[in-house]
Amino acid sequence: MKGRWTPPPGGSLAVLFLLLAGCGAGAPSAARTPREPGGGGTTEERERLEDLADQMASLGDEFEQATSLSGIDCREVCDLSQRICGLAGDICEIAEAHPEEDRAGARCEDARGRCERARAEATARCGCRG
C-alpha cells in the first residue's frame, strides 16, 4: 500500500527507540547543579542575588547624592531611578523563582521599596516617567 508507513523487520524500532532515549543523556541535569543547604536556588543564583543587592545599595547611594545636590541633574536622577527599578525586577525574579528562600524574599521587598521611593522622588523633583 502506498502512503502508509510500516515498521522495518528485525526489531529496528527497538534500536531506534533506544537511540532516541539516549539523546537526553548529555543534557544538563538539575541534580548536577550545586545547591546550598536549605534550598533557595543554586549557588550561582545566590551569588547573583548578592551581587544585585550590592549594586542596588551602590545605586541607592548615587541616587541619594544626585538628589541632594543643589544643582540637580534630572537626566542622571531619571536614569538612576530606572536602573534601581530594573535591578529590583531582577532581584524579585530570582526571589519569585525560590519562594521558600526567606532572604531572597526580603531582598525583593527591600528592592521594591527602593524602586518606589526612587521613582516617587524622581517624578516629584524631575518629572521622570517610568
Image: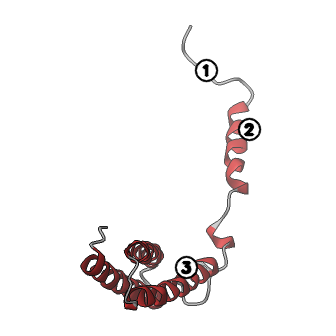
Q: Nearer the viewer, residue 12 or 94?
A: 94
The residue located at (71%, 44%) in the rendering is: 18
Element type at marker 3?
loop
Give the x, y percent position of residue 33: 66, 73
Q: Which residue is labeled 1 in the image?
A: 6
Q: Quadrant of residue 95?
A: bottom left
| Residue lying farthest to the front in this orientation | 71
Q: Badge 1, how many Cα within 10 Å: few under 14, some, many 20+?
A: few
Q: Nearer the viewer, mark 3 or mark 2?
A: 3
Q: CA distance from mark 2 to mark 1?
A: 16 Å
Q: CA distance from mark 3 to mark 1?
A: 48 Å
Element type at marker 1?
loop
Q: Which residue is labeled 2 in the image?
A: 15
The reply to whether dot 2 and dot 1 touch (C-beta < 8 Å) is no
Q: Is residue 48 left or right of residue 95?
A: right
Say which label, 2 or 1, has the lower sequence index: 1
Q: Quadrant of residue 117?
A: bottom left
Say which label, 3 or 2, has the lower sequence index: 2
Q: Badge 3, how many Cα within 10 Å: few under 14, some, many 20+?
A: many
Q: Is residue 42 left or right of residue 124?
A: right
Compared to residue 96, the image places residue 117 above or below, namely: below
Q: Nearer the viewer, residue 39 or 73?
A: 73
Compared to residue 28, the image places residue 78 above or below, namely: below
Say which label, 3 or 1, has the lower sequence index: 1
Compared to residue 24, the image places residue 130 above or below, namely: below
Give the x, y percent position of residue 19: 73, 42
Return the mark for residue 41.
3
Q: Amino acid at mark 2?
A: Val
Q: Amino acid at mark 3?
A: Gly
The reply to whether dot 3 and dot 1 touch (C-beta < 8 Å) is no
Quarter of the figure that contains the N terminus: top right
The residue located at (27%, 72%) in the rendering is: 127
